[in-house]
Image (cartoon, helix red, strand yellow):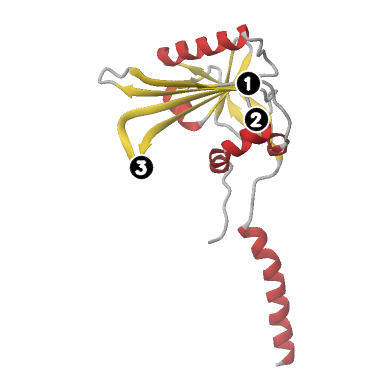
Amino acid sequence: MGKKRIRINILFAIASLIIPSLCNAVPPETGTFTIPEVTITNAQIKSIIALRVQYARCMGYLPPEYNFYFMFSTVVIGKEHVENRYGVMIDLDKTEGIPWYTWDSYCVIDGYICFMDKYFTEGFTKPTYPQKQETFKYSFDTERNDRTAGSVHEWRYRMLLEEDGNYKIIYSRETTPIYSWQQHYMQNYDRIKEMSSYYECD
């Protein structure tokens, strides 16, 4: 009986060490990810991006220090998705080709490495031919460091999907200038957390 109790205590001790590490799992601070190169096919999106790239060059925010990030989402009011309303967000960040976490695809526009999320990739791109894969580094640690990253701009567009399949811009907003990396991380924490597949035990 005494040996059985000792075995149970040992198993309980081991479990108490293992379970918290499983429940509080987080992605590594740094790592690599491999994604395909794609081509943007939507003419309206291409024209919007061309203006943003022109702006970045005119302002001296040049590659390879600066990168673009493209995101696409449905519009939600309360808990309801609004039919045929979508949002596009374009970020210009000084990340030097090392984003805060993994992305779904990339392209190169006028020298800028542009990263795209899954929904932007699915909605507005096609794979390059022949298909090319590229490996990039990411760094949570860099994103959290409290240092000025340089000028960052963000453009948000709300669009209406019309019957002919074209998008009509019904709202746009520009946020400028920049904050520090620390502020950028905290203001985008929910999005970064969702992308990084964090999870915790209930």
Disc 1 marks which amino acid?
Asn
Q: First in sequence, mark 1 or 3: give its number.
A: 1
Residue at coordinates 37% horizontally, 33% vertically from top-left? Answer: 75
Q: Between marks 1 and 2, how big is the CA–CA gap?
A: 9 Å
Q: Between marks 1 and 3, how big is the CA–CA gap?
A: 32 Å
Residue at coordinates 63% horizontally, 56% vertically from top-left? Answer: 24
**Left or right: 47 with respect to 7?**
left
Q: First in sequence, mark 1 or 2: give its number.
A: 1
The answer to whether the residue labelled 1 contacts the one labelled 2, judged by CB atoms less than 8 Å apart, is: yes
Please provide percent x and percent y for residue 10: 73, 77
86 or 35, nearer to the observer: 86
Please provide percent x and percent y for residue 74: 39, 33
Q: Determine the secondary structure under disc 1.
A: strand
Above or below residue 156? Residue 81 is below
Which residue is tagged 3? 78
Structural crowding at the residue carrying mark 3, measured as other residues with C-alpha within 10 Å and reported as few (<14), some (14–19) or many (≥20): few
The mark tally for this picture is: 3
Q: Determine the secondary structure under disc 3.
A: loop
Please provide percent x and percent y for residue 34: 63, 31
The answer to which image quadrant residue 84 occupies is: top left
Disc 2 marks which amino acid?
Pro
159 or 125, nearer to the observer: 159
Question: Which circle, 1 or 3, is nearer the viewer?
Answer: 3
Residue 79 visible, this angle? yes
Above or below residue 144? Residue 24 is below
The answer to whether the residue labelled 3 contacts the one labelled 2, judged by CB atoms less than 8 Å apart, is: no
**Left or right: 196 with respect to 82?**
right
Q: Residue 93: give its label.
A: none
Which residue is tagged 1? 67
Residue 32 visible, this angle? no
Q: Determine the secondary structure under disc 2.
A: loop
Which residue is tagged 2? 99
